[in-house]
Image (tube, rainbow, N blue to C red):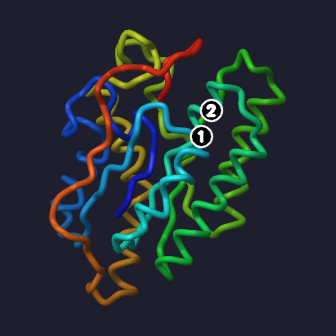
């Protein structure tokens, strides 16, 4: 299972085992499901950056793609239509390389200072992609965490360890049925990659800009 994302995935400012992909791996193992989580989160990543990386990442077998991209597009005010195009291409390339791969897409919110029209269009991108590409939607990745001071680090954007635990619950609530179905359809013979994980960057160094990147 590949988790392609930003520093929210990489675990900005935290140990990698505190980031939600590692916590999801623990839940997968406890449930006895045959999946290995690959954390492909990179600080500052945009949907365009994810698209540039996806072909290299697809060299490994992938049964499920969790797509956590778009937060930095929103922070930079990039056009939602471009973000949508990039996310669609990532999904298309994934399913071309790995027929039958399931996709879970994490919904995000844009900063309110960008205006109501932008935030509405930004939010709708994730809903539309899930519907148009038969993907499963996490309505809002940071539900219960975003805007809650004690669950975020000093920058007010990146979750603390406790915040990451809540994010993991948000993901698992949607992801678990997808994994169970995937195992059922493959008669319990889901392909797994080689040993080891692809760790995301979490050196805690934000990219230049008005806002810290996700």
Q: Residue sitting at 56 percent across and 55 percent down?
A: 137
Q: Position of residue 174 (x, y in %)?
A: 45, 56
Q: Which mark is residue 193?
A: none
- Label 1 neighbour load within 10 Å: few <14, some 14-19, many 20+: many
Q: Is residue 52 left or right of residue 43?
A: right
Give the mark nearer the N terminus: 1 vs 2.
1
- Label 2 neighbour load within 10 Å: few <14, some 14-19, many 20+: many
Q: Residue sitting at 42 percent across and 44 percent down?
A: 170
Image quadrant assignment for residue 57: bottom left
Image quadrant assignment for residue 112: top right
**Count of numbered badges drawn on the protein:** 2
Q: Position of residue 116 (x, y in %)?
A: 80, 25
Q: Residue furthest right?
A: 117
Q: Is residue 18 above or below residue 153?
A: below
Q: Residue sitting at 24 percent across and 46 percent down?
A: 23
Q: Position of residue 46 (x, y in %)?
A: 56, 39
Q: Is residue 109 left or right of residue 192?
A: right
Q: Position of residue 85 (x, y in %)?
A: 72, 54
What residue did someone put label 2 on?
109
What residue did someone put label 1 on?
70
């Amino acid at each position: 299972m590949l988790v392609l994302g930003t520093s929210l995935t990489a675990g900005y400012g935290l140990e990698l085992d505190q980031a939600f992909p590692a916590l999801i791996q623990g839940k997968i193992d406890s449930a006895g499901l045959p999946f290995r989580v690959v954390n492909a989160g990179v600080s500052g990543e945009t949907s365009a950056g994810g698209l540039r990386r996806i072909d290299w990442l697809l060299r490994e077998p992938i049964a499920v793609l969790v797509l956590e991209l778009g937060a930095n597009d929103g922070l930079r005010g990039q056009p939602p239509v471009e973000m949508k195009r990039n996310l669609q291409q990532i999904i298309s390339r994934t399913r071309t390389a790995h027929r039958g791969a399931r996709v879970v897409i994490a919904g995000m919110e844009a900063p309110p200072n960008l205006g109501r029209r932008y935030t509405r269009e930004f939010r709708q991108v994730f809903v539309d992609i899930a519907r148009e590409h038969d993907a499963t939607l996490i309505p809002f990745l940071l539900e219960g965490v975003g805007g809650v001071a004690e669950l975020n680090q000093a920058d007010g954007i990146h979750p603390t360890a406790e915040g990451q635990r809540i994010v993991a619950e948000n993901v698992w609530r949607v992801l678990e049925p997808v994994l169970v179905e995937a195992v059922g359809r493959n008669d319990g013979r889901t392909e797994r990659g080689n040993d080891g994980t692809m760790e995301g960057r979490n050196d805690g160094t934000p990219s230049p800009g008005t806002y810290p990147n996700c």
